[in-house]
Amino acid sequence: MRATCPDCGAQAHLSAFFVEDDGKRLAALLAEMQPELGRAVIGYLGLFKPAKTALRMARAVKIVQELVALVETGAVCKDERSGVRRPASALTWATGIETMLLQRTSLTLPLETHNYLRAVVYGLADKADAAVERQREADARSGKHLPKETADERKESKYANHLEWVAQMQRVGHFTPEQAKEERRQARERYGVSDDDAE
């Protein structure tokens, strides 16, 4: 199977891109990510590519390792000096990356750090956190107490989050209606939702 590099256009057999140990490490890191985040990270790496040379594989591995460490905390901090953190899922990070990729022409490239991404993700997480807090306050005022989630409810919640991410990607123009439809189909398959239930 042949593959094409999205940045330089080089074509080679797929295995050629993973001959080096760093290439194998990069593939392993991407394989461990949620699919939405993994796809976004591949494009994100292009934002670090020097203008006149290729992005070294070792540098790509370091960038992804740093990003994995940020995502795994489950939170995002815009500025470490302030210490203010907001909850941020892998899907929030993926949405932040997709937002940056759509704004690529307005960015100063190549990127050197993840600071701009952290600011974008913080903005998304802050809005989501504020919405959750408003809902919590509304629930408290109405005396509503939420029961613990069952396994089925957790599955439905993950499915709903995935559908919301697909809708966001379609709204910002990253997915065509056909791509969004296919993503929703894959989500139904992944979370075991039947077509009837999806209606």
Image (cartoon, rainbow, N blue to C red):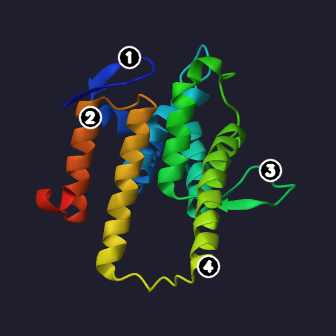
Mark positioned earlier in the residue sequence (2 or 3): 3
Q: Which mark is residue 140?
A: 4
Q: Which of marks 4 and 2 is nearer the N terminus?
A: 4
Query: The disc labelled 3 sits on which kind of residue?
Result: Asp
Q: How far apart are marks 4 and 1 (CA)?
A: 56 Å
Residue 87 appearing in the image: no
Choose between 161 and 60: the one closer to the eye. Answer: 161
Indicate left or right for 66 with 197 as reference.
Answer: right
In the rendered structure, which amino acid carries the disc numbered 1? Gly
- Give x and y (percent) for residue 85: 72, 61
The residues bearing labels 4 and 3 have C-alpha atoms spaced at a distance of 31 Å
Q: What element carries label 2?
A: helix
Instruction: Say what amino acid the circle numbered 4 marks.
Output: Ala
Q: Label 2 amino acid?
A: Gln
What residue lies at 75% left-to-right and 49% top-to-bottom? Answer: 78
**Cα–Cα gap, marks 1 and 2:** 23 Å
Look at the image and tell me in which quarter the N terminus lies.
top left
Position of residue 26 in the picture relative to residue 140 (left or right): left
- Label 4's element? helix
Residue at 44%, 48% in the rendered image: 37
Percent from the top left, x then y, of residue 83? 81, 60
Q: How far apart are marks 4 and 2 (CA)?
A: 40 Å
Q: What element carries label 1?
A: loop
Q: Mark 3 — residue?
A: 79
Tally of numbered tags: 4
- Return the mark for residue 179: 2
Identify the residue position indicated by label 1 in the image. Answer: 9
* Within-10-Å neighbours for mark 1: few <14, some 14–19, many 20+: few
28 lies above or below 116: below
- Other residues around mark 4 within 10 Å, as few (<14) / some (14–19) / many (≥20): few
